[in-house]
Image (cartoon, grey):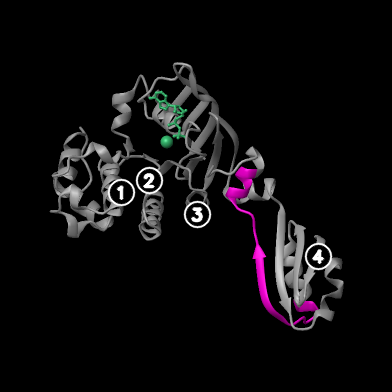
Amino acid sequence: MRPVIQVSGLRKSYGRTVAVADATFEVNEGEIFGLIGPNGAGKTTTMECIEGLRKPDRGSIAVLALDPFRDVYKLQNRIGVQLQQAQLQKRIKVWEAVDLWASLYKKKSVDGDRLLDQLGLTDKRNAWFMNLSGGQKQRLFIALALINDPEVVFLDELTTGLDPQSRHAIWDLVRGIRERGKTVFLTTHLMEEAERLCDRVAIMEHGRIIDIDTPANLVLRHCPERTVVIEVSDPAAAEPFNLIPRVERVERNGSQFTIYGRGDLVTEVIHFLSENRVRVTDFRAILPNLEDVFLKLTGRSIRE
Ligand SMILES: Nc1ncnc2c1ncn2[C@@H]1O[C@H](COP(=O)(O)OP(=O)(O)O)[C@@H](O)[C@H]1O
Ligand SMILES: [Mg+2]
């Protein structure tokens, strides 16, 4: 796999505030890579250094083998950056914004109408920016980030403030970007978004990267605990539940059993139930997620 972004020992302060203390990671070609962490962790600063908008105090960054600060003009034609909302005029029409953006690049841009179609904005072609919904605005920002057919796309907190339905639609669009062979670098403080969308994530806290891996591996590594809650019609059948491999503890409440264990617990419980033909009236597996990983690694919830 070819790394398209390489960050090593990055440090960036604003006066006495150390926004990024030490960040090292690589983003591979064709993946959706997420930098995740709470507000103030240093995600945006890291992204802006990679985009060439800010000059690091220390460390090295390469994007498509270019120095983002020195080669900023060369790079501009090959990367796409999502805009912040406030940067568009209220009365610019959707197609005008697309045309304007296309004109900013020296190289030939993609077909704007096709792009609007891909992002579900054809109906809104003549609408003013101020009359778009939050989700439509975000889709327009994605369109503008893609107008120069970039190899790497940067998305900063893309779905913040959107309702769940628009959020899911945006996730599909981002997956579509990956399917067209592009690399996506995004930041989010939403663990569900990271879990559903990202191939790999780097967890950032207080300007440092704490761990990097696929969401599933991070959960496996840091939160191996698993819980199964079942209701059985014949509680006597539950007698040997604590003999199931991987089980550490069983709690009973009437006909409901809560089985605690780790690793492959869920498979083992299912196997046991079917082998012993235990009649089950309810079954629920409680699996940890990235939210739990964050809590485990930092001792605090990401929402605090
Ligand atoms: N332009 C700036 N001037 C001064 N401090 C800043 C500036 N931008 C960010 N910071 C500070 O740097 C830290 C990291 O911010 P940021 O990179 O925006 O984190 P995140 O995107 O994870 O919320 C925060 O403490 C923030 O207040
Ligand atoms: Mg930010």
The residue tagged 4 is 250
User: CA–CA distance between discs 1 and 3?
Assistant: 19 Å
Q: Which mark is residue 187?
A: none
Residue 183 image point, x, y percent: 42, 42
Check whether the beta carbons of the residues at disc 4 and disc 2 lie within 8 A of each other. Answer: no
Mark 4 secondary-structure assignment: strand
Q: Which mark is residue 196?
A: 3
In the rendered view, does 119 fall on the left or right side of 31?
Answer: left
Q: Is residue 145 above or below residue 197?
A: above
Among the two numbered marks 1 and 3 on one chain, the one whose residue lies closer to the N terminus? 1
User: CA–CA distance between discs 2 and 1?
Assistant: 7 Å
| Residue 81 in view of the camera | yes
Mark 2 secondary-structure assignment: loop
> Which of label 1 and label 3 is nearer to you?
1
Residue closest to the eye, 1 or 249? 249
Q: Residue at x 49, y 30 (%)?
A: 6
Q: Which mark is residue 158?
A: 2
The residue tagged 1 is 138
